[in-house]
Image (spheres, rainbow, N blue to C red):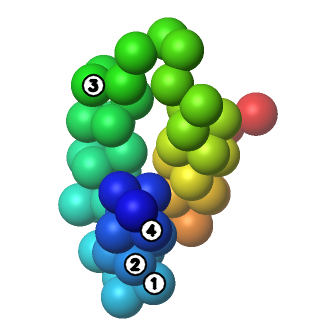
Amino acid sequence: MKILFGRLMCDIGLWNQSQQFFEHLLIESNSNDEDIARIESSFGNVLQWKGEWIE
């Protein structure tokens, strides 16, 4: 559910807030959290939409 909130922020153009939200989720998640891959993927999408993705 938390990931959907971050994606919703992207959908309405709140990319900076979404980026901060996903950064917070990554910091707060533990290494066994099954959502880490989804969080990282969503975080990457935010950076791509902002034009800040560096390969």
8 to the left or right of 54: left
- Gap in Å between the C-alphas at discs 4 and 3? 16 Å
Q: Secondary structure at mark 4?
A: helix
Which disc number belongs to residue 11? 1
Discs 2, 4 touching: Cβ within 8 Å:
yes
Q: Residue at x 34, y 69 (%)?
A: 5
Viewer-side label of 1, 4: 4
Q: Are marks 1 and 4 in contact (CB under 8 Å)?
A: no
Q: Amino acid at mark 1?
A: Asp
The CA distance from mark 1 to mark 4 is 10 Å
Helix, strand or loop at label 3? It is helix
Which residue, given by chain and number where applicable, does mark 3 sit on? 28
Disc ID at residue 8 = 2
Type of amino acid under label 4: Leu
Residue depth check, mark 2 versus mark 4: number of the one nearer the observer: 4
Q: Quadrant of the C terminus?
A: top right
Q: Which mark is first along the chain, 4 or 1?
A: 4
The crowding category of the residue bearing disc 2, from other C-alpha atoms within 10 Å (few below 14, some 14 to 19, many at least 20), is some
